[in-house]
Amino acid sequence: MTANYNIDGSPPGDGRFFTITVSSGKGGVGKTTVSLNIAIALAQRKRRVVLLDGDLGLGNINVMLGVRPVKDLSHVIDGKCSLEEALIKGPWGISILPAGTGYEDMADLEHEARARLLATLHDLRRLADILIIDTGAGIGTNVLSFAMAADVILVVVTPDVASITDAYSLVKLISQRPGFGRLEMLINRAPSREAGEEVTVKMRGVVKKFLSRDIAGLGIVPEDQSVQQALSMRKPLLLSHPKCPASMVLRSIADKLIAELRQMELQFKPPQLDARLEKIISRIDAGEQGEDGLPGAVNGGEAG
Ligand SMILES: Nc1ncnc2c1ncn2[C@@H]1O[C@H](COP(=O)(O)OP(=O)(O)O)[C@@H](O)[C@H]1O
Ligand SMILES: [Mg+2]
């Protein structure tokens, strides 16, 4: 059931391609749940989606779907297999690209390997309209690099105080670097609509006050026990519990993303992943580091 359309529903082939990274400061807030289910919602709206699984922890996409990858992005980068060979077919025609160590060690890649990574990501546009990157936990260089390369940076936040402060740190790091995409947030595991709105207001407030930036709230996903049930069934929530409250919100968020990407497409030439990535890579090559002297690591050790 592979969808075969551009973001605006037109047939593919004219190279329009968008990248959405799903990130958070803190691990375990629901990035993988959100990435996988938004990917499926977009596929159900006839978009061709590739999901780059950058989460090497336990709760990754392969585990959620009960599939075992044989090849990953590192094999593609090393020239050991083709992009197609590394892609895992998921539900609704989505493709999953396990990042493997090619992603983990991006900052350490030799120039030639980086060029191959670029070529691989460029090659993705043959196969997809939208690339969703589940960045995994922490704020390492790779998370930042991918966030900087994205058209939309979706920050997942829960009402937990540590999640809010870590999300703020991530937004701060991103906004200190030039040329990032649209910053948006999704509140997950909200015990009530009011609690979710409170988090939205708090995040918007601190981001505005201390960073002079706007961060839009895309939606509030409720705490929903179906999420855990879906996980134990090794099925995406949207397919196991299509009518549960969390699924309804995730679908509406996917619709908002489609509307937004369409708007971006109309308004200006979308920032292209490869051009941005090339810029970032040349900065990494030049040894540019974060303000703290580290290549952006704040919270890199957390599992997630
Ligand atoms: N809306 C939700 N309601 C209930 N549980 C959730 C919700 N979102 C995520 N979870 C649970 O939280 C845990 C972490 O989710 P996961 O998507 O793996 O987070 P991350 O990728 O950020 O580490 C999982 O056990 C998942 O089932
Ligand atoms: Mg995860």
Image: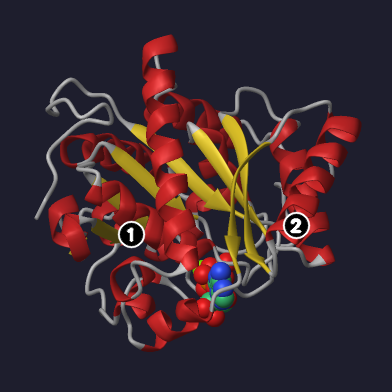
Query: Label 1 amino acid?
Result: Ser
Secondary structure at numbered mark 2: helix
Which corner quadrant of the image does residue 129 belong to?
top left
Q: Is mark 1 within 8 Å of ligand 2?
A: no
Does the rendering let one see residue 303?
A: yes
Secondary structure at numbered mark 1: helix
The numbered mark, 1 or 2, whose residue comes first in the sequence reads 1
Q: Which labelled disc corresponds to residue 194? A: 2
- Packing grade of label 2 (10 A; few <14, some 14-19, many >=20) is few
Viewer-closest of 163 and 304: 163
Viewer-closest of 65 and 220: 220
User: Dividing the image into 4 quarters, which one contains the N terminus?
Assistant: bottom left
The answer to whether 244 is drawn above or below residue 184 in the figure is: below
Which corner quadrant of the image does residue 38 belong to?
bottom left
Q: How far apart are marks 1 and 2 (CA)?
A: 44 Å
Q: Where is residue 51 in the image (x, y as percent from the top left)?
A: 33, 54
Viewer-closest of 35 and 87: 35
- Relative to 31, is 92 on the left or the right? left
Query: Label 2 amino acid?
Result: Glu
Q: Residue placed farthest to the right in the image? A: 209
Give the residue pinned by disc 1.
Answer: 74
Q: Position of residue 115 (x, y in %)?
A: 35, 37
Q: Residue placed farthest to the left in the image? A: 1
Q: Which residue is drawn at 83% across and 26% down?
A: 212
Q: Where is residue 205 in the image (x, y as percent from the top left)?
A: 85, 38
Viewer-closest of 71 and 214: 214
Q: Position of residue 277 (x, y in %)?
A: 46, 32
Q: Which residue is drawn at 25% across and 44% down?
A: 45
The answer to whether 178 is drawn above or below residue 173 in the figure is: above
Q: Does the residue labelled 2 lie within 8 Å of ligand 1?
A: no
- Relative to 74, is 176 on the left or the right? right
